[in-house]
Image: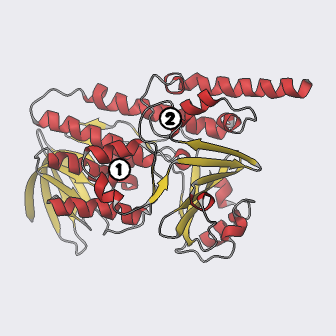
């Protein structure tokens, strides 16, 4: 059996694995990335938020992405019947990036791995992790290729960036139920032949058809658009027929987008992911760390997935570099508590979206520009900025403002 030794083994070559690999390779470590799939491959998570731009820039991956001219995302639009709520990332409380991209992930992720390969990073595709044996000061990971040949990789540290593959959570029994309501998604791509001219045709939009059910529309610069519904699992399963028929029935729920996409062929049989939200018992252990979706995934409503993936990858890579250089690292405080603080903020917004409280604020007739700027910072991914009241006091502030909105409406109806 083939055996090799590296400093760090990274499982998964998506944005999380790529950011971690870039940082550690730049720092001079011997890095190996193993990826189960062959790139390019389809994956969900096509709407980015500005915070992740900091991470791509920090590890030198921004320029290769800029060359691809992906669709610019400068904000987001939410629709609820005739009501419209628009967020502009240039009008936010926290200083930071004012834009990001809407991306077909197959091309986006391959751009990252192509760049890393050109630099000399060791990436092996179509290699599946079968087992991991943690020893005193190292680990031995058994992988298998497409032909069924096995080999072993000895590493000082493992980063699990396997996304929904969730390799170490499965192998180490780290899974736990998420506190986020059980929702599922159904989605596909279409050639957007009726795309309107100008901004209307290019903006990302979330069309709210009920308190718990919404449609995403994510246009790409290549002329295609991602469409998908998210809703309670039981509700999505109540639509009859195969997934294409389910999605076509659901598209009739959208007054705004039904005509634009009616009758257009789907580029692939719509995919369905059930019970999207995932959680784990712990984010790290001796000799390993979980990043991105292999650790926590909340809900796609605010597009936080890729940013948590790159945030956790960049931070964990820095901490691993410190540890392997003999410096002391407090993984609980410096990694777990930090990451979970951000997850906790976003969790509040996801939960309050589905209770309806956040929707009351978004679609309130009288808009408060200061509140909107503070919420916009959260939606842009700056969820660790405690100068923002909607970060520092997130547990109570969304509820309080929603309650005040209700009182305003009651008083208005009485007057």
Visible residue check, residue 3? yes
For label 1, the residue is 170
194 relative to 375 in the view: left or right: right
Specify the quadrant that holds the C terminus: top right
Taking depth in this image into account, of 203 and 409 the one nearest to the observer is: 203
- Mark 2: secondary structure: helix
Specify the quadrant that holds the N terminus: bottom left
> At which x and y percent is residue 235?
68, 55
- Mark 1: secondary structure: helix
- Rendered image: mark on residue 377: 2
Q: CA distance from mark 2 to mark 1?
A: 34 Å
> At which x and y percent is residue 308?
40, 42
Q: Residue at 74% of width from left, 32% of height from top?
A: 366
How many numbered badges does the structure rendering display?
2
**Rendered image quadrant of residue 239:** bottom right
Q: Residue at 86% of width from left, 26% of height from top?
A: 412
> At which x and y percent is residue 333?
30, 25
Q: Residue at 46% of width from left, 42% of height from top?
A: 98
Picture layout, residue 302 above or below residue 218: above
- Cβ atoms under marks 2 and 1 closer than 8 Å: no
> At which x and y percent is residue 265?
60, 77
Visible residue check, residue 173? no
Label 1 crowd (10 A; few <14 / some 14-19 / many >=20): few
Task: Tell which residue pokes out farthest to the right in this image.
Answer: 415
Q: Residue at 47% of width from left, 69% of height from top?
A: 222
């Amino acid at each position: 059996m083939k055996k090799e030794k590296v400093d760090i083994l990274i499982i998964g070559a998506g944005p999380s694995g790529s950011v971690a690999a870039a940082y550690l390779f730049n720092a001079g470590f011997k890095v190996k990335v193993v990826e189960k799939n062959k790139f390019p491959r389809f994956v969900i998570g096509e709407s980015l938020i500005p915070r992740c731009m900091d991470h791509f820039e920090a590890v030198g991956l921004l320029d290769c992405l800029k060359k691809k001219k992906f669709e610019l995302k400068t904000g987001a639009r939410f629709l609820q019947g005739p009501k419209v709520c628009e967020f502009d990332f240039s009008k936010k409380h926290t200083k930071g990036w004012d834009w990001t991209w809407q991306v077909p992930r197959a091309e986006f992720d391959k751009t990252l791995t192509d760049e890393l390969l050109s630099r000399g990073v060791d990436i092996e595709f179509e290699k599946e992790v079968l087992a991991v044996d943690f020893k005193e000061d190292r680990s031995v990971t058994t992988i298998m290729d497409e032909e069924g040949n096995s080999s072993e990789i000895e590493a000082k540290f493992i980063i699990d960036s396997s996304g929904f593959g969730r390799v170490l959570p499965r192998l180490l029994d780290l899974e736990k139920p998420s506190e986020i309501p059980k929702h599922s998604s159904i989605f596909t791509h279409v050639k957007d032949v009726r795309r309107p001219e100008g901004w209307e045709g290019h903006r990302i939009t979330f069309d709210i058809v009920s308190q718990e059910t919404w449609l995403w529309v994510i246009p790409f610069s290549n002329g295609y658009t991602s469409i998908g519904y998210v809703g309670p699992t039981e509700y999505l399963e109540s639509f009859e027929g195969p997934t294409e028929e389910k999605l076509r029935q659901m598209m009739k729920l959208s007054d705004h987008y039904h005509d634009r996409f009616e009758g257009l062929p789907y580029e692939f049989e719509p995919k369905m992911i059930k019970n999207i939200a995932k959680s784990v018992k712990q984010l790290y252990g001796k000799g390993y760390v979980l990043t991105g979706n292999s650790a926590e995934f909340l809900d796609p409503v605010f597009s936080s997935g890729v940013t948590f993936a790159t945030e956790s990858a960049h931070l964990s890579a820095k901490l691993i570099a410190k540890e392997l250089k003999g410096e002391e690292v407090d993984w609980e405080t410096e990694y777990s508590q930090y990451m979970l603080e951000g997850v906790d903020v976003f969790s509040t917004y996801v939960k309050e979206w589905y209770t309806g409280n956040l929707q009351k604020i978004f679609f309130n007739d009288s808009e408060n520009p200061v509140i909107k700027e503070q919420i916009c910072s959260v939606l842009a991914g700056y969820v660790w900025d405690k100068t923002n009241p909607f970060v520092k006091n997130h547990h109570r502030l969304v509820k309080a403002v929603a309650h005040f909105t209700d009182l305003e409406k009651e008083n208005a109806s009485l007057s």
